[in-house]
Amino acid sequence: MAASDPCVLLRSLFDAAVAAADPALILPEHLPKPPKGRTIVVGAGKAAAAMAAAVEKHWRGPLEGLVVTRVGHGAPTKLIRVVEAGHPNPDAAGMAAAGEILAMVHGLTSDDLVLALISGGGSALLSLPGGEVTLADKQAITRALLKSGARIGEMNIVRKHLSAIKGGRLAIAAAPASVVTLILSDVPGDDPSVIASGPTVPDASTLADAREVLARYRIDVPPRVAAHLADPLNETPKPGDPRLLRVENRLVATPRGSLLAAAAKAREAGFAPLILGDAIEGEARECAIVHAGIALSAARNGEPVRPPCVLLSGGETTVTIGGQGRGGRDSEFALSLAIALDGRDGIFALAADTDGIDGGEDNAGAIVTPDTLVRARALGLDPRARLDDNDSYSLFAALGDLVVTGPTLTNVDDFRAILVDG
């Protein structure tokens, strides 16, 4: 069965994946019962404002609070204040909001409830440096980690140990109140302690682990940061900490759930879906080469699935930046995929971030068609040179093949779909 318009089908799969993680649709069934005392709503992440709006719509009883989200990802609320702050690098607005959130949960009683709304992006947005560490320190370290190609889990080990609020510290501050955290996962493996650096989750990583990550990626830190990471008093609360006994962390949306929704949509269109994995990590360009190999095998040999089929995957790749161009990990994946497919007829692809923003650009990702390379070269663009310069955005912009959605107000990691139509 041939797709009448493969690009339209691919976009419908992405839309289905995003809809499966829409806070307005998924949050209501996970809301806890109102407490005897106060309800304080706090949160951080790219979906935090949309989550807050969903809570307000369905909550029965009084509530108050504050959430912080990325600039441009706000949503209208009446009772829960929304602060927009910088991402992926933390800024003063996020630091101030984190300080307010921490102050809000102090002095509560066992009759009170803290409802925490956590989604991807919270690590940068909920930035409250611990000890003598400064915001400038955290900004410099974040920039270096982003450029290094460090995995999200590694980055968040460092962030937790430089924070006064992450790594379980928010929940510690809220004791003895009950804490219920509703989480949208944007990390491979759905580990709640990694998502937004786990502000309400006990942390099994250590100060030594944070020092090792910085050493592995050769990131220099000022003496006050080194001193902070050497002081045992700055260790995060660990699993089994009695102060966390009244904390419940609930995953309400995951990358796998979104991939399953896309798979169902593909099946309806007559394409056999194959989910390659929901926790794929590694360099974007290298992951693309592997994906291309699987797609070519399906096209040539009918293995591991016969066409017409759609290969689906999620997770969070990385980009080690060596060039001067523009582009996030999804458009870099798409360009590397196009090069590896080398114009193979009948194979189309879409790679995009479910939050609607690929890195720091204004697109969610990009679409690959069999003639991507031919059209690029006709415009005088060298695909390989663009990839080497980390300049995937400019190439796909010139072709008109960027996927532009604007902020989706959710976030369940990267989405990749490769359609093999013969």
Image: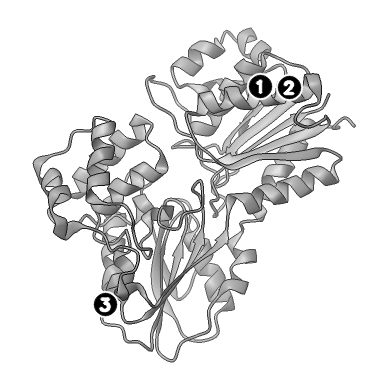
Q: Nearer the viewer, residue 338 or 275?
A: 275
For this view, does 381 lie left or right of residue 154? right
The disc, 3 or 1, on the residue closer to the chain's N-terminal end is 3
**Amino acid at pointer 2:** Ser
Q: Residue 261 in the image: state x and y as whole percent.
A: 71, 51
User: What residue sits right under mark 1 in the picture?
Assistant: 293
Residue at left 76%, top 40%?
273
Residue at left 50%, top 62%?
183
Is there a contact, CB below 8 Å, between mark 1 and mark 2? yes
**Amino acid at pointer 3:** His
Q: Residues within 10 Å of mark 1 (few under 14, many from 20)?
A: some
Q: Using the numbered discs, state the Cα–Cα distance from disc 2 to disc 3 in whole angstroms.
A: 58 Å
Q: Is residue 164 visible?
A: yes
User: What residue sits right under mark 2 in the picture?
Assistant: 297
Q: Using the numbered discs, state the Cα–Cα distance from disc 1 to disc 2 in whole angstroms.
A: 6 Å
User: Dot 3 lies on which element?
Assistant: loop
User: What residue sits right under mark 3 in the picture?
Assistant: 106
**Amino acid at pointer 1:** Gly
For this view, does 116 lie left or right of residue 237? right
Q: Residue 368 in the image: state x and y as whole percent.
A: 66, 25
Q: Nearer the viewer, residue 227 or 196?
A: 227
User: Dot 1 lies on which element?
Assistant: helix
